[in-house]
Structure formats: structure tokens, C-alpha cells
Image (cartoon, helix red, strand yellow):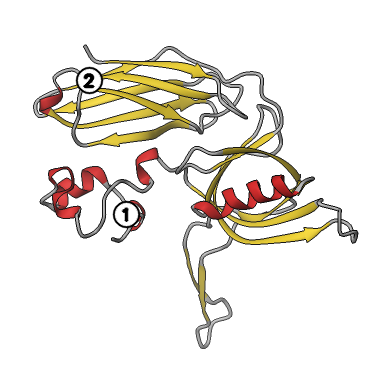
Amino acid sequence: MTAIVATITPASPVPVVTLNVTIDNPANVVAWTIYRISAADARLPVWLGSTSSGAYTLTDATAPLGVPVTYELSVVYATSSTSVTSAPVTITGTAGCYLTDPASGRTVSVTVVSWPERERAARQAKLDVLGRPDPVVLSDVHATPAGTWRMFTKTDADTAALVGLLTAQAIAILRTQPGSSIPNVTAAVGQITEIRVGDAGNDARRWIDVEIQEIAPLPATALPLDATLAGLAVYQGVTTLAQLALIRPTLLQLSQIPVG
């Protein structure tokens, strides 16, 4: 029987969602996808697979906080398909903001002091034409927002934990509470500036300024897999570009395969 069961599992500093997945007739699976469905991120694919062993235990360490979340398992066979949905679960008992490295699931509690601007860069090219007052403008959609987070840490340990997370994969997920004016975002991390709050040598307080570019949420399988470019030809039986597309469906995902 194909089924998916979601449960809340205690973890520090934020609980995680554990998924127990069963896929019927695994030998005939062409592809399977798990979607996370909530008011915070609509219908987000969080796991993608091209083959199945029939049973998995997975951990979602980036589920939104304080809102009901369900998970949909969609399985495609050679001649049919099926979908099942879990009962809703909610992560409760949290307060404030949390930053998560999606590759490891490592999470730290953060104090966001300010996030004054979210700038959406225009994508335009202007061409002045002789004899006409208005230029020809080539215009595309605006970029997703960019800006700067200012965070506050009180101890050397807190600073080390925050900077370590920000530099681990250069991708971070900020989660906030329902109703907060600070949105949940997935961000590419740019320049990080550490600023001393006081001049005393024993004052460990720091402002941490983080330049970020907001990006679309990443599924868990967009992160590095246990494959190298040298071994890719035999990874999970991959021999064609079509098969590769099933396990690494975007160039971003392909670029994150470690070289070795």
C-alpha cells in the first residue's frame, strides 16, 4: 500500500517533521515526488526520486512554523500513477526567528534587528533612437528581492554558530512566526559583515550584517547527493540525459554535485 505519515519530532531549537513513506510496487516506479502543502509555501516539491526502494524515513527540517502542513506523495508508474496525502501536522511552541541550513538541517535561533529594504532590481535595456524622443526599452520581469539582514548576537558562541551556518552552503532559510511582518524566505547569502557593538575587549556583542538575494525554495534533493561528476555515469543507473533529468532536474542541482 502506498502511504505517507507525517509526525512532529522534538528537536533543538525547533521541532522537525518526520515522514514515513511506503511506495507500493517499487520495482515499477518511474518517478516519485513529495510535496509540502501549507499556507506559507503553497505546494512545494520537497523530495524528488527516480527509483524507489519501497520505504523511506525522511526528515523535513524546514517546515513553516505555527501553520498546518500536509504532505502529498505522488508516484508515477510506467502505465499509471497514484497520490496519497498525510494528515495535517503543526509545529507549535516556537517563538521568534530561526535560520536553517537546508543541506544539513542545522538550525539556530536568531535575532533580526532590522531588514529595512527589499529591493527588486529591474531588468531593462534602454536604446536611444535618433529622431524620436522616447527610447526603445527592452524589459523583463523584476528580480526577486535583495536586501541586508542585520542580526544581533550576545556571545562568541552565538556569533560562531550564526556565521558558521551562513557560510556552510551559502543558502539559508529564514522562518518566522505566523502574522510576523518579516516573511519566510530562502536566500542566497552574500557578503557577511561582523560589527562590534562596544569597544571593550570583553564585550562579545555583535551586529551581523548579511547581504542576501531571495531565491525560490529548494527541494531537499536540490542539495548535494552522494555522487561525483566522475561517477555520475553509473549513479543510480543513469546512462542518458533523460534519466539524469529525473534525479537532477535543474542546472542548479547539477552544479551542486561535488567534483571528485
Residue at position x 34%, y 28% from top? 34
Image-quadrant location for residue 222:
top left
Q: Given the current orientation, which residue lies at the most extreme front position?
A: 202
Mark 2 residue type: Ile
Image-quadrant location for residue 46:
top left
Question: Is mark 2 in CB contact (under 8 Å) with mark 1?
Answer: no
Which residue matches tag 1?
A: 257
**Is residue 80 positioned above or below 244 on the image?**
above
Give the structural element (helix, strand or loop) at label 2.
Answer: loop
The alpha-carbon separation of the residues under discs 2 and 1 comes to 27 Å
**Tag on residue 189?**
none
Give the number of the mark in front: 2 or 1: 1
Give the structural element (helix, strand or loop) at label 1.
Answer: loop
Q: Horizontally, is 173 left or right of 199 in the view?
A: left
Foreground residue among 89 and 169? 169
Which residue matches tag 2?
A: 23
Mark 1 residue type: Ile
Foreground residue among 124 and 194? 194
